[in-house]
Amino acid sequence: MKLLNKLKLRSLLTLGFCAVIVIGVLVAGFAASRLYDGNSLQSLTQARLNDLNLLQEIKNNANDSARLLRDSLISTSSAENPAVQTQLSQASQRNTEIISTFRRLVNGAKSIPGINIKEVDEASGLLAQIEKTRPPYLQLTEDIKSSIKANNSDVAHELMSNRLSALQEPYFEAIDAMIAYQNRVTLGTSKESQANLWQSQIVLLVLTLLSVVTGLIVARMVSTRIFQQLGGEPAYAAQVTETIAKGDLTITVNSLHAEQNSILSGMDEMRKGLLRIVTSVAKHTQH
């Protein structure tokens, strides 16, 4: 504080404004950085929500295929309906595409800097379970469809009753496990995004308050320095100067609270000196 008191007014103003500007730049830079991080987290959350929708689509397709297969076994017309066969084929093809996309994404994620390798490995393992349990299930559904087409309903019933459940359950459980994982990581990313936003708001508030306090301190220091150098209010100093300039040396200068080296104190000393000179000249003139 002593060092600041020794600074000239121009230096003090420059230092104060520079401090406010630096804090403003820090606030802007931090805000930009956190906004970028927030946008990245939002993009990641959106991407994981899309992945979750794709996983749900796999499950829906698998359920629809199982339902259509049961309907084909119950109704001959359904089994012979080309639309049903097309739906089964399209559902299977779509799931193949989605699973291939997930495998490509999971393998590529391992090379992304800063990625959570533990999460990637977990996703890879869950996806591997889907890839492992799906082919036997698909092969059995093809066998059932072939038996239905060949009018071997007994064989189709036997396959569906005795073998389908044993292969379908692990496949569906693998899908459910992958969906549960995706739900967990999506929720975690969402919470991280909210926490990041909350922390950013707190830091920005602190930096803003710091900027305001710094500005107030600088304004107070500058106003105090000006008051000390003048010895009073600028308007009063101007009034005293104008009165003395008009030749009124009887004015009482209120410089009780002024420092000895202030302008008002100097003007009062000047007034007193001029008054002594004028008084002395008047006395000598009378004699």
Image (cartoon, helix red, strand yellow):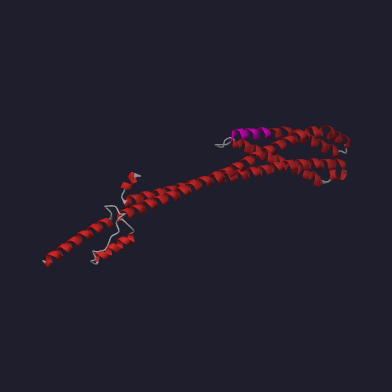
In the rendered image, which quarter is residue 152 located in? top right
For the residue pair 140 and 36, the one nearer the viewer reads as 36
Q: Main secondary structure of the magenta part?
A: helix
Q: Residue at x 30, y 60 (%)?
A: 237
Identity of the residue furthest to the front in this view? 287
Residue closest to the eye, 55 or 150: 55
Residue 121 in the magenta stretch? The answer is: yes
Instruction: Work out which quarter of the rendered image holds the C terminus and state it.
Output: bottom left
Residue 286 location in percent, x, y? Answer: 12, 67
Q: Is residue 134 visible?
A: no
Q: Quadrant of residue 45?
A: top right
- Residue at the (85%, 34%) spot, across then down: 161
- Left or right of 206 on screen, residue 47: right
Residue at x 82% of width, y 32% of height: 163
Q: Position of residue 84 (x, y in %)?
A: 81, 45
Which part of the image, by quadrant, shows the N terminus? top left
Q: Is residue 152 magenta?
A: no
User: Who's the residue at 81% across and 35% down the image?
Assistant: 143
Q: Nearer the viewer, residue 226 or 115?
A: 226
Residue 133, given in percent of the width and then of the height, sits at 74, 33
Horizontal side of 18 relative to 70 (left or right) equals left
Q: Looking at the rendering, which quadrant does residue 90 occupy?
A: top right
Magenta-colored span: 116-126
Query: Relative to 72, does residue 264 appear above or below in the rendering?
Result: below
* Location of residue 134 in the rendering, given as x and y in whole percent from the top left corner: 74, 35
Q: Can residue 117 be seen at all in this image of the molecule?
A: yes
